[in-house]
Amino acid sequence: MERCGQGLRPEGAVTGETLRKGPTGPCAILPSRPRASAVSRRFPGLARAASGHLVALALALAGAALPAAPACAADDLPFDPRVTSIARMLGGIAPDYALHAPLASDRAWQAHRDWLAPRWQRLRAGRLRALEAWRDEALAAEHPRCRTLFYPFSGPDFLNAYLLFPLCDTYVFIGLEPPGALPELDRMPRREVAQTLHDMRAALGDLLALNFFMTNNMAAQLDTPRIRGVLPVLAASMGAIRARIVAIRAFDVGGASAATAVRSVAVAFYHPDIGKLQTLYYFSADASDAGLRAQPQLARYVASLRPAAVLVKSASYLLHQPGFARMRETILEIADPLVQDDTGIPYRILRERGWDMRLYGAYSGPISLFASRRQPELEAAYQRGDGRQLPFAFGYKGTRDGSNAMVARLAGR
């Protein structure tokens, strides 16, 4: 059996080190038992079931194997202490890796921590606490049977995906942004560390303030000389919730030519309170019909995920457009359930296809940038009083009172 971490070594400079089972470490933005408190009470058998089972994941995509999550017993999960510590420091969380103590004592990192700490705290005490309470009520039936979460148009939004669906084995993200690389803070001159942390704060700013990433901002924030691609933000988000990174591997999923290969990254990780190995796959790809025609291997892979929980939020109403029909139809084929805001699949289409929907929050139409995407059928449903309480901001409106969400299921699936 392959030893955990040895099969998913990151490419380039971030290499695996001696893997060990580490201490819990100080609390980050989640409480000491981050809603595994709620999840464990609701599903007491899950943690016990994970312990003693081997988690093995081998996925094939158009003849090319995706990096497989190494098989490990959940009660003996090692992790890469250096990479995990870098992720924590990027997220403003004190490292528990002794070799990074000098970095943590540097004024640049302390300023980074001091800027992020109150923002994480406000996020934790407000939006995330409310999100978790809603999740435990609205998605209670989904947690025991979630194996895969598919999140198209995700960007680096690990935080919302993981807190909504914390018990999945596999997370599959698709976004236009490149995978990038993890900044090696411990191998940089101190001046470059300060500049990297400055760029990191900018990259996290939209998530902390708005709960989504603005596409135009990401184009600049994830393409600086020091912060490249989504991996720094994904890692910082993992560090902020105390997840431990087992290993990272960049890979390409081959196409007919080098130009059609899908740039990708796999992150194997686990959270101490969940107690099992989990894997995030991020694919940098165009999810339009034209993009999927150019990269059919990715389209086939997504179709093979059935059944999968699907999350769509702050998605620029792309699934309303004719040019995204194939992704829309794929989601309708695989989703069980579909959790989305009004930027996802139009309400009218779901109704016509016989989906059962629970609506949450309020609908006052799209923001002005997407004014043409107003949905009269959805508006009428909310006017009938179909909407239940949504106690947190979700989507483009940025406020609890202006947000909407729906949980949709196809009868019999």
Image: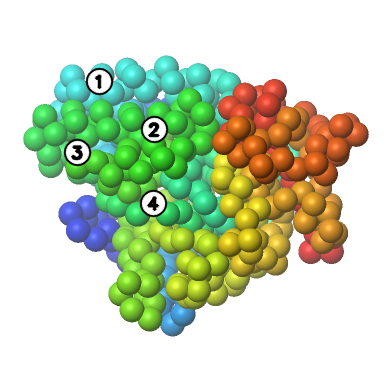
Of the numbered discs 2 and 4, the one sitting upstream in the chain is 4
Q: Which residue is mark 2?
A: 204
Q: Which residue is mark 1?
A: 110
Residue in the picture at 19% in, 31% down: 195
* Horizontal relation, residue 158 to residue 198: left or right: right
Crowdedness near tag 4: few (<14), some (14–19) or many (≥20) residues, C-alpha within 10 Å: many
Q: Which residue is mark 4?
A: 177
Crowdedness near tag 1: few (<14), some (14–19) or many (≥20) residues, C-alpha within 10 Å: some
Q: Amino acid at mark 2?
A: Leu
CA–CA distance between discs 2 and 3?
17 Å
Of the numbered discs 1 and 3, the one sitting upstream in the chain is 1
Asked whether disc 2 touches disc 3, contact meaning CB atoms under 8 Å apart, the reply is no
Can you say whether 164 is above or below 355 in the image? above
Asked whether disc 2 touches disc 4, contact meaning CB atoms under 8 Å apart, the reply is no
Secondary structure under badge 4? loop
Q: Amino acid at mark 3?
A: Leu
Q: In the image, which is nearer the foreground, mark 2 or mark 3?
A: 2
Q: Amino acid at mark 4?
A: Glu
Of the numbered discs 4 and 1, the one sitting upstream in the chain is 1
Residue 49 x/y as whole percent: 61, 55
Q: Amino acid at mark 1?
A: Gln
Q: Which mark is residue 185?
A: 3
Residue in the picture at 90% in, 34% down: 384
CA–CA distance between discs 2 and 4?
15 Å
Q: Quadrant of the C terminus?
A: bottom right
